[in-house]
Image (cartoon, coloured by chain):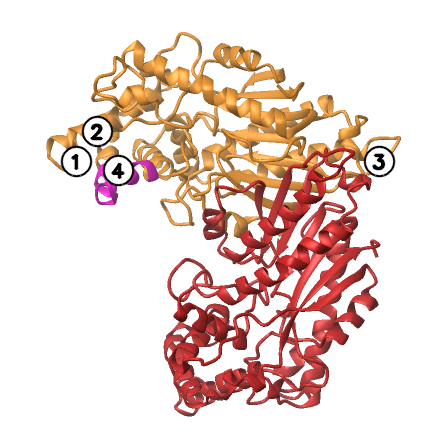
Chain colours: A red, B orange
Amino acid sequence: MSESTAVSSHTEMDVEKFKEPSSTYHMLGGDDPHSYAQNSEYQKQLVVSAEEWICKLIDKHLDIEKPAFDPYMTFRIADFGCSIGPNTFFAIENIIKAVENKYKYNIKNPRIPEYHVFFNDHVDNDFNTLFRNIPTTRKYFPAGVPGSFHGRLFPNTTLHFAHCSTALHWLSRIPKEVIEVNSIAFNKGRIHYGGAAKEVKDAYSTQYRKDIDSFLSARAQELVLEGLMVLVILCFPDGVPPSESSIGIGFDIFGSCLEDMARTGKITEEQVDSFNLPFYYPSPSELKALIEENGCFTLERIERLISPMKIEKPNLKIVTKGCVSHLRAVIGGLVKEHFGNEIVEELFQLHMKKLGENPMMFDEKYRKETNYFLFLKQKSHL
Amino acid sequence: MSESTAVSSHTEMDVEKFKEPSSTYHMLGGDDPHSYAQNSEYQKQLVVSAEEWICKLIDKHLDIEKPAFDPYMTFRIADFGCSIGPNTFFAIENIIKAVENKYKYNIKNPRIPEYHVFFNDHVDNDFNTLFRNIPTTRKYFPAGVPGSFHGRLFPNTTLHFAHCSTALHWLSRIPKEVIEVNSIAFNKGRIHYGGAAKEVKDAYSTQYRKDIDSFLSARAQELVLEGLMVLVILCFPDGVPPSESSIGIGFDIFGSCLEDMARTGKITEEQVDSFNLPFYYPSPSELKALIEENGCFTLERIERLISPMKIEKPNLKIVTKGCVSHLRAVIGGLVKEHFGNEIVEELFQLHMKKLGENPMMFDEKYRKETNYFLFLKQKSHL
């Protein structure tokens, strides 16, 4: 791997990667320098670091003796929040490799099932690009599934394996209290709950609780009994306020860029006040409690994933550029939708400048957010 | 319906509607005046006239007592060569209505299954537009399936119902002999087999035989035992040479436009000689023989469909315009791919002018091609 790739990917971690908050938002499509396809190396590293866990845990928990996993039937896998590739393809290949090993080495009946793979993302995701990118060497029949993963996307008892990596921090909507001027949770002058009043954080966490519950309940319906699910979710350690993490610092700087532009009259103050990022990062214990409360799955394993691509001496210029490119691929659509296309270029240029002047978010000591790998087994159709 | 719609749709029949010949060709996407979405009224009329047959024959042939049609399982439907809508949605709704009636009035167990619906077309089809067009009032879970229907697209025993309307005349490729200068079947100066030497027609029909066989064999694998399939296919009556039909006449005029442009040096003669339309129209008896030869299906019914929207006194100008718009939506991509984008506008303008000067293709007496409705039942996995 070239140095520049390594460095830019490193910083991408600090800003985080996001997906579809509502049916109008999506990763930037196509293949140009601002596209998600060109700015998702960080997510790929997460897929790689989850690989070993997936193999081990499929081997342990996939019970191919159960009727639902009969090798004469099709084995159905879905990736939720797949974006346009290529990471979704790596994840699917890895899952299939592990599933195949399990079937192949079954002494009683070493037969491998056929695989039907479903790539899900919001209806405005660039499925045309996704479909063109599907590897020709695949061992599965692919299909695309448009729609929000906070609702049902498949008939009952369809899937054997569900996967969702670095997508569940997207809320289905901005909590409405944080953009209502007269609400106690009105998030004036900020774009996220990091550093905001307790009421703002509470509004975000209430929305997250609803969203996670909808997601888990929908997947429980769609999975066969004892169907398996892997989630990769960015968490804040318990007790760490987001404002003291690199993500929080990054969002604060981004918010200050918007305020600068409001001061010069390029956008209005009201526009800034009504713009909030639809992302929430739970703590691992919060996540465990939510899964338990939902009741449809047993959490078979939760593991901290190694931070992708730590580097010793970051080149600040490259790091900053990578960070801004990544954020733009992820929230460029949100910004355009809310403020209009004409400010996008200037805003991200300003963001790059300010990050360069305030590099504290790249400091190791603020790298407090961590990705967690969760392995779940469906236990009921609540 | 306004007069202009009726008239333009009427003529669209004469030129016919086409789909994906290879992975590089597809209907024109989007919603602009040249798009397929704006130029597919004729196909819609066919869907409507097939509706009654579908209802009757599903009622007669769908055996919901068979394990494969258990109402506790998902009922899976696929439309092959769906393009971008809206016709595919009408067809699916109609199928679901008929299937639902069958399950609903089952005295022993009046339970309705869930529906999983798969929209298939070539990978370069505009799936983004298709997905945005899916009706919000649907009663099914939708998915898109990219790929050629001449090959396998689903795991074994996945589908309960397959549908393919006005798409099977697309060959998987141009028979190579017709564009090889030294071949006995070289189709010099023509763009189709209508009016060409016997060897050209033979090359086309040989390719069609292979393609239909691949299609049927793939669908037989994908359908459950006794799964059902509806095909709507444009045929020439036995013994009618295509050159004496409105389609053949239309293609001849289109070919003469290309020759005119070659004479003025806008394209080369070699380009014209190497351009052939990848469409084949069997006779009903040829079709029956091919289905028998393939052996995977019983042909439960074959019916001539009423010609859509016959009108008494066509307004020639409107008729011509509708005809050219339709042809452009269908083969615009082929033309652009072969000759380059710069000639497209001029070519179709010239075509409009020449059709206006030679209106014989709009004469009822040349309307010899007819759509046939076929209802098949899967009988084996050959």
Q: Are marks 4 and 1 in contact (CB under 8 Å)?
A: no
Q: What amino acid is at disc 2? A: Val
Q: Which of disc 2 and disc 3 is earlier in sequence?
A: 3
Q: Are marks 2 and 1 in contact (CB under 8 Å)?
A: yes
Examine the rendered structure and indicate whether residue A122 appears above or below residue A293.
above
Classify mark 2: helix, strand or loop: helix
The verdict on a common chain for dots 3 and 2 is yes
Q: What amino acid is at disc 1? A: Ile
Q: Mark 3, residues whose alpha carbon is within 10 Å: few (<14), some, or many (≥20)?
A: some
Q: What is the quadrant of the C terminus of chain A in the image?
A: bottom right
Examine the rendered structure and indicate whether residue B199 appears above or below residue A93.
above
The verdict on a common chain for dots 2 and 1 is yes
- x 89%, y 30%: residue: B108
Q: Nearer the viewer, residue A360 or B186?
A: A360
Q: Nearer the viewer, residue A117 or B117?
A: A117
Q: Which of disc 3 and disc 4 is earlier in sequence?
A: 3
Q: Which of disc 1 and disc 4 is earlier in sequence?
A: 1
Select label 3 or label 2 by which is in front.
2
Chain letter for mark 3, please: B
Residue under circle 2? B272
Residue B110 has which mark? Answer: 3
Residue under circle 4? B348
User: How far, Cα to Cα, is label 4 from label 3?
Assistant: 54 Å
Select label 4 or label 1 by which is in front.
1
Residue under circle 1? B267
User: How far, Cα to Cα, is label 3 from label 2?
Assistant: 60 Å
Classify mark 4: helix, strand or loop: helix
Q: What amino acid is at disc 3? A: Pro
Report the span colored magenta.
B333-349
Residue B121, x across and y down, in percent: 49, 38
**Within the image, what quadrant is residue B376 found in?**
top right
